[in-house]
Image: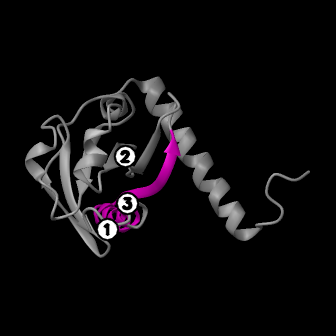
Amino acid sequence: MLGGDAMSDAAAIARGVRRLLRAKGYSTLTELSLIDGRRADVIAVNGEGALAIVEIKSSVADFRADHKWRDYMACCDRLYFAIPAEAPAEIMPEEAGLIVADAYGAEIVREAPPRTIAPATRRAVLLRFAQAAADRLHRLADPGGFGEG
């Protein structure tokens, strides 16, 4: 996957990551706008309200161009990078966990260091998660009626 069409590579990695997180008891969304305006590639919440963000890097160039990943730490309890198997794991920062993924699954190869986020931040992110999930379901159920009225 490394070096191919970045959009399809990222989508394949996201699919594998979401399968892994679902198996671990998390519910996930992709492309969620956070409270600071940044957009998380994959965000997950479990039954205890723990939040994880996964930043997908489909190529070395993609990683090197990213200067915002530390900003995600304020919005989650655990931050991970997800990469394809052929990406060099050694360039991924130790401050985040590491997931190797493809379209069919994923494996955590380095656990993310836990952190505690501010209660007000947790509440704000959880509300964004819930509203986005509900809006996406509404669009599926009534594609022509969303936002009208």
Mark 1 Cα within 10 Å, few/some/many (few <14, many 20+)?
A: many
The percent coordinates of residue 146 (x first, y second) are 79, 57
Q: CA distance from mark 2 to mark 3?
A: 34 Å
Q: Magenta segment, which residues?
A: 9-33
Q: Nearer the viewer, residue 132 or 96?
A: 96
- Tally of numbered discs: 3
State the mark number for residue 48: 2
Q: Is residue 140 above or below residue 50?
A: below
Magenta region, mostly helix, strand or loop?
A: helix
Q: Relative to the observer, which residue lies in front, 10 or 18?
A: 10
Please give the residue where the numbered disc 1 appears in the rendered image: 16
* For marks 1 and 2 on the same chain, the one whose residue lies earlier in the sequence: 1
Picture disc at residue 6: 3
Give the residue type that dot 2 points to.
Glu
**Residue nearest the observer in this picture, 81 or 130:** 81
Colouring method of the image: one colour
Which residue occupies the foreground of this view, 30 or 87? Answer: 87
Say which residue appears at 41% left-offset and 50% top-offset: 41
In the rendered structure, which amino acid carries the disc numbered 1? Answer: Gly
Residue drawn at point x = 48 percent, y = 35 percent: 38
Q: Is residue 27 magenta?
A: yes
Q: Nearer the viewer, mark 1 or mark 3?
A: 3
Residue 84: give x, y in percent of width and height.
Answer: 22, 62
